[in-house]
Image: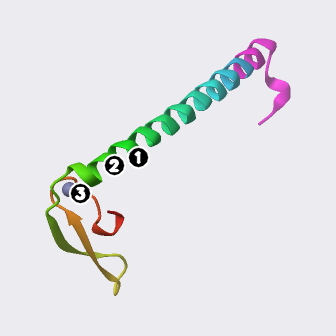
Amino acid sequence: MNYYTHNNDDIFLLIKLKKQLTQELVQMKLDIGSKENTLNEVVKHLKYACKHDFETDYVCSGLENIQCVKYCKHCELNYDSI
Ligand SMILES: [Zn+2]
């Protein structure tokens, strides 16, 4: 990138874009944190409210690594997390 080819309008737009993106990212991170908290609360309630019906399944991760997972058919929570 050649910095000397930019005129003042270009630089102004870049600075404006930088500020806008920074502000949007801050807001998005706040939104993500808020949604994570809400999700944690929902999961906490589901652990007790759902009439769990567990099912066992096998998941491949890699060629020889087969894992057994037990999860609820309704709320999809993992048996080990309850
Ligand atoms: Zn459940």
> How far apart in space, not on screen, are marks 2 and 3 (Cα)?
10 Å
Q: Which quarter of the figure has residue 18? A: top right
Q: What secondary structure is found at the residue carrying circle 1?
A: helix
Q: Is residue 64 above or below residue 2?
A: below
Residue type, label 2: Val
For the residues bearing labels 2 and 1, Cβ distance under 8 angstroms: yes
Q: Disc 1 designates what residue?
A: 40
Specify the farthest residue to the top.
9
Which residue is disc 2 drawn over?
Answer: 43
| Residue 34, image x, y percentages | 48, 35
Q: Decide which of 16, 72 is in the foreground and name it.
A: 72
Q: What is the number of the mark on residue 76?
A: 3
- Do the residues under discs 3 and 1 have CB atoms within 8 angstroms? no
Question: Magenta region: which residues?
Answer: 1-14
Residue closest to the eye, 60 or 79? 79
In-front residue for pair 33/8 = 33
| Residue 70 horizontal/vertical position (percent) | 24, 71
Task: Check if residue 63 falls in the magenta segment.
Answer: no
Task: Please report the residue visible at 49 percent of the width from the left and 37 percent of the height from the top.
Answer: 32
Q: Quadrant of the C terminus?
A: bottom left
Give the distance between the C-alpha atoms of the residues marked 2 and 1, in whole angstroms: 5 Å
